[in-house]
Image: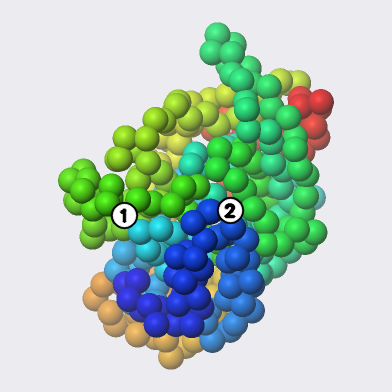
Amino acid sequence: MSSFFANHPYIQEAIKLEQTHTDRRKFHSSMESVLLKMGQDKEFMSNVIERNIKDKGWLQFDWSDYNIPFFYVYETDDFIIKIHLFPAGPLGKNHYAAHAIHHHNNYILTTNAFFGSGYESMLFEKDVKVDEATMKGNLKVNKHFHQKEWNPSRTDSWEPHIVFLPEHFSATILIWSPDVKRKTDALRNSSLLKPFKKELRHLIYRLGIGDKIGMAREKTYQYYVEGKEVKAIDEESYFSPSKSANGSEQKQYAMQMLFFFLQKSGYGSTELLSSLKTDSDTPAYFQPWLDMYLSGETIPEVLHRHELNIPKKSFTREDIIAACS
Ligand SMILES: [Fe+2]
């Protein structure tokens, strides 16, 4: 489905910038203006929605607690552009962590907060030491900001960071890429990569390339605060309950958020979405939300709901500041 946007001027510009800037941080800086243009362009956003409803990979995506509800924008071997949705916290809870403190291994992320209030965030120093006996980590806050003050913002590879619950429902358009430009020959010659060719998005999303071409990978931790201490938890054990939570509750939660966004933003259209009503590829759990959308009924806002997989279930900005000072 990447061919959908292949000739779009923004995508052409992104592809050219990727080829021009071997230095991936320069590539990301150069992409800021493109992400800003995309976020302001209603027609482009409507095309994004169209691309997704015509894409079986999105239409039949197996939403679980692990996934931030999203729309695909464009994917190449070198970068991926997506839209992520962030529900607001319950009233007065916007100083609560939305997720654990984490990093994205060798991926750089540039984010344009184009819709809603945006969120508050912190970046931490990269060189985190974890005492494996106590699982205590020594995180230090490097930058504390709100997306209103720094946009587009950047998260470097290996850089721990945290997102707090936004004041209001928010959407971001973001680009990911590995921090080193891909060596085309290495990729072409890697037989391990061949089975993934059809599903590039799975290849590039969450470190696939690095792992398959044998880049060293250390144990990956997520971090949270307990008492006055930062604690580390192995990423796989942290994520496994949320990855396996993929039933109808999760599907409804994702649908409500996606359709709330479509209605509030106006990026979809009745004309576009009505095709889903009769499309045999449309999963049944779309129908109640489609009906509400198509009849103009107000789709209620969905709030951030889940507790984190940590002993105390949540932690706050103040907990982090106390534990990291
Ligand atoms: Fe992140």
* Residue 170 locus on image (x, y percent): 65, 63
What is the C-alpha distance between the residues marked 1 and 2? 19 Å
Q: Residue at x 54, y 13 (%)?
A: 132
194 or 132: nearer the viewer: 194
Q: Residue at x 71, y 62 (%)?
A: 151
Asked if the beta carbon under badge 1 is closer than 8 A to the nearest atom of ligand 1, the reply is no
Q: Residue at x 80, y 32 (%)?
A: 321
Residue 199 disc label? none
Q: Quadrant of the N terminus?
A: bottom left
Q: Secondary structure at mark 1?
A: helix
The first of marks 1 and 2 along the sequence is 2
Q: Is residue 284 above or below residue 244?
A: below
Horizontal relation, residue 39 to residue 196: left or right: right
* Residue 50 locus on image (x, y percent): 41, 80
Cβ–Cβ under 8 Å for marks 1 and 2? no
| Residue 30 seen in the figure | yes
Place residue 54 in its image quadrant: bottom left
| Residue 301 seen in the figure | no
- The residue to which callout 1 is attached is 184
Place residue 302 in its image quadrant: bottom right
235 or 124: nearer the viewer: 124
- The residue to which callout 2 is attached is 25
